[in-house]
Image (spheres, rainbow, N blue to C red):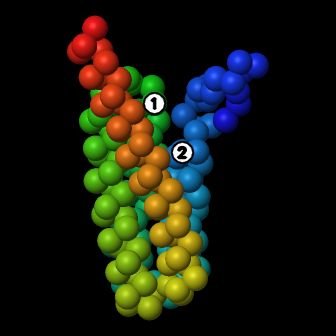
Amino acid sequence: MKQTSDGKTLRPITASQTRIYIAAVSVMEWVIEVICDSGLPKTFRHTIGSTMLAKALGMLDDIQSAYIIREEKRKHLSKLLADYNVLVTLIRLCGRRKWISVKKEARAVELMDDINRQALAWRKSDEKNMENDENV
């Protein structure tokens, strides 16, 4: 993130410049790679693979919406975390079934943890702002 001369952090101009969005794009790329190149059985590519891709795309949409529509930020962050939980569950399932390598699963978990941390911090910051607004 860029900083002003007095040390204040500047907010990115668009959601696509945020760390959480960039991490979510990496997750989507990972999901596409798993669907196309992994040992995911053909019978599950259309069900589990499609669900994974839909959840990854949904996370991108929720990040964008939370960034732009401030009044509905909390709603979009809740949906983001719900999509996150489903996607993590499916990633773990793929790992347990040995449809993806341990290395691929570890990379996905790393990316997903980054998204989770950032989403929770964003939600906590929003709650703090709401408390400050109520106290004014």
Q: Residue at x 46, y 47 (%)?
A: 118
Nearer to us in this view, 115 or 72 = 115
Q: Residue at x 54, y 34 (%)?
A: 15
Q: Is residue 71 visible?
A: no
Disc 2 marks a residue whose amino acid type is Tyr
Q: Residue at x 30, y 63 (%)?
A: 86
The reply to whether callout 1 and callout 2 are in contact (CB within 8 Å) is: yes
| Mark 1 surroundings within 10 Å by alpha-carbon count, few (fewer than 14), some (14 through 19), many (20 or more) | some
- Looking at the image, the residue that sits furthest to the left is 134
Which mark, by number, is residue 67?
A: 1
Q: Is residue 94 visible?
A: yes
Left or right placement of residue 29 versus residue 125 in this view: right
**Kind of element beneath mark 2:** helix
Left or right placement of residue 10 versus residue 99 in this view: right
Q: CA distance from mark 1 to mark 2?
A: 10 Å
Position of residue 43 measured from the top left corner of the image (x, y, whole percent) = 36, 84
**Kind of element beneath mark 1:** helix
Q: In terms of sequence position, does the residue under pointer 1 or pointer 2 come before the other?
A: 2
Quarter location, residue 72: top left
Nearer to us in this view, 4 or 38 = 4
Which mark, by number, is residue 21?
A: 2
- Looking at the image, the residue that sits furthest to the right is 5
Position of residue 25 measured from the top left corner of the image (x, y, whole percent) = 56, 53
Which mark, by number, is residue 135?
A: none
Considering only vertical position in the picture, is 31 above or below 84?
below
Considering only vertical position in the picture, is 74 above or below 109?
above
Quadrant containing the N terminus is top right
Considering only vertical position in the picture, is 75 above or below 40?
above
